[in-house]
């Protein structure tokens, strides 16, 4: 059976109750002895009244006068002593998985608790180092893989064998996946370092991305259209990261849009970019599954590069926004309004 945690305040209250009860009994016995009051002498009403008067005067009033102020004072002191611990708890609860250099400030904590806070701060430092090593390892591996893959592409470009064409597609998918891994590492590093951001015009970046994606979209038998409504809206962020998020949504839209269909990129004067496709749409549950880095579903890339929406989600988190879905209209939204 699991041990139930105890409360210091409850233990203190029980202790004060025991002290009060014990003191009352002690004073009662002392009064009876001092005034030589026996139970036989309290047989009459006057004697009983006199005995009760002595007990109230010499037992009850001293106990109340001592225990009540002492209880209030002790509880007040205890609450003040635990206030820094409550603040430290709030500080720990506010830590997110991407925060760096977060430590508990033990300057106001009681001396007795400082060894525990030192241990917690040491643990936070170890977890931080572990996360940084993992991020650096992923970035290093992705960077090192780009060179051999580029060499493979050059070799395959000189081959006319049909198998070489399939291999080129596989290598291209691997390069996209590696680029996505590197972008994820960059987003994690940016959020941890709180790097400076620029004022980004959403209309300008949408025009640029649509223009760059249009040839590939047309080559796949679809079309793409940019619809700009309302005034221009700017957000703070990294231009290349926001462009990557929009490219991923366009790639996703092209995959689920049937041949001859059109992908619409819409700006409506709000801090958001909407991408409409010809697919069945994503429910909130499906979107939540797809943005997990280890999950794939119908909208995941068939060529194995299934990190697209996970990357979009990370980019939007870093920029204080979110990726949302409107399944009835087959729309995915980059929402910067949060």
Image: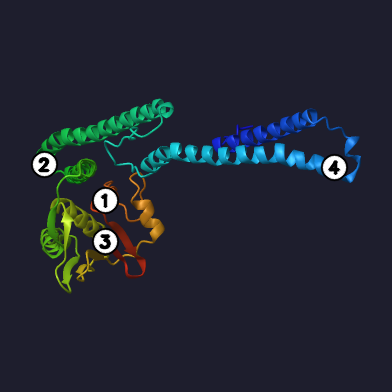
**Along the line of sight, which residue is nearer the eye, 98 or 291?**
98
Q: Secondary structure at mark 3?
A: strand
On screen, residue 15 versus residue 244, left or right, reads right
Q: Secondary structure at mark 4?
A: helix
Q: Secondary structure at mark 2?
A: loop
Q: Which mark is residue 308?
A: 1
Q: Can you tell which of label 4 and label 2 is closer to the viewer? A: 4
Q: Measure the alpha-carbon separation of dots 2 and 3.
A: 45 Å
**Residue under numbered circle 4:** 48
The residue at the point 57 percent across, 41 percent down is 69
2 or 1: tag closer to the N-terminus? 2
Q: Measure the alpha-carbon separation of dots 3 and 1.
A: 17 Å
Colour scheme used in the picture? rainbow
Q: Can you tell which of label 2 and label 1 is closer to the viewer? A: 1
Q: Measure the alpha-carbon separation of dots 3 and 4.
A: 82 Å
Rendered-image quadrant of the N terminus: top right
Q: Is residue 301 visible?
A: no
**Residue under numbered circle 3:** 335
Residues under numbered marks 4 and 2 in contact, where contact means CB atoms less than 8 Å apart? no
| Mark 4 crowdedness (10 Å alpha carbons): few <14, some 14-19, many ≥20 | some
Q: Measure the alpha-carbon separation of dots 4 and 2.
A: 117 Å
The residue at the point 36 percent across, 56 percent down is 287
Q: Measure the alpha-carbon separation of dots 1 and 4.
A: 89 Å
């Amino acid at each position: 059976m699991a041990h139930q945690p105890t409360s210091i305040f409850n233990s203190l209250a029980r202790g004060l109750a025991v002290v009060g009860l014990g003191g009352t009994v002690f004073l009662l016995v002392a009064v009876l002895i001092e005034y030589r009051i026996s139970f036989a002498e309290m047989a009459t009403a006057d004697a009983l009244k006199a005995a009760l008067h002595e007990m109230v005067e010499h037992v009850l009033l001293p106990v109340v006068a001592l225990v009540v102020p002492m209880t209030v004072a002790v509880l007040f002191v205890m609450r003040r002593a635990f206030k820094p611990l409550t603040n430290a708890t709030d500080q720990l609860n506010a830590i997110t998985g991407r925060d760096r250099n977060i430590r508990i400030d033990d300057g106001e904590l009681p001396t007795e608790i400082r060894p525990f806070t030192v241990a917690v701060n040491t643990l936070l430092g170890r977890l931080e180092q572990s996360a940084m090593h993992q991020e650096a390892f992923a970035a290093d591996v992705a960077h090192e893989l780009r060179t051999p893959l580029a060499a493979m592409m050059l070799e395959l470009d000189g081959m006319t064998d049909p198998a070489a064409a399939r291999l080129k597609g596989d290598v291209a998918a691997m390069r996209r996946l590696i680029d996505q891994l590197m972008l994820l590492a960059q987003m994690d590093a940016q959020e941890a370092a709180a790097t400076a951001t620029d004022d980004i015009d959403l209309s300008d970046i949408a025009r640029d991305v649509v223009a760059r994606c249009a040839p590939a979209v047309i080559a796949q038998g679809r079309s793409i259209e940019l619809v700009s409504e309302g005034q221009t809206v700017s957000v703070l962020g990294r231009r290349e990261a926001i462009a990557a998020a929009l490219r991923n949504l366009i790639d996703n839209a092209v995959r689920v849009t049937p041949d001859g269909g059109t992908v619409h990129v819409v700006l409506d004067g709000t801090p958001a970019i909407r991408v409409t496709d010809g697919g069945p749409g994503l429910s909130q549950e499906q979107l939540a599954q797809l943005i997990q880095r280890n999950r794939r579903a119908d909208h995941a890339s068939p060529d194995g590069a299934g990190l697209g929406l996970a990357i979009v989600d990370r980019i939007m988190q870093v920029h204080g926004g979110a990726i949302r879905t409107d399944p009835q209209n087959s729309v995915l939204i980059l929402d910067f309004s949060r």
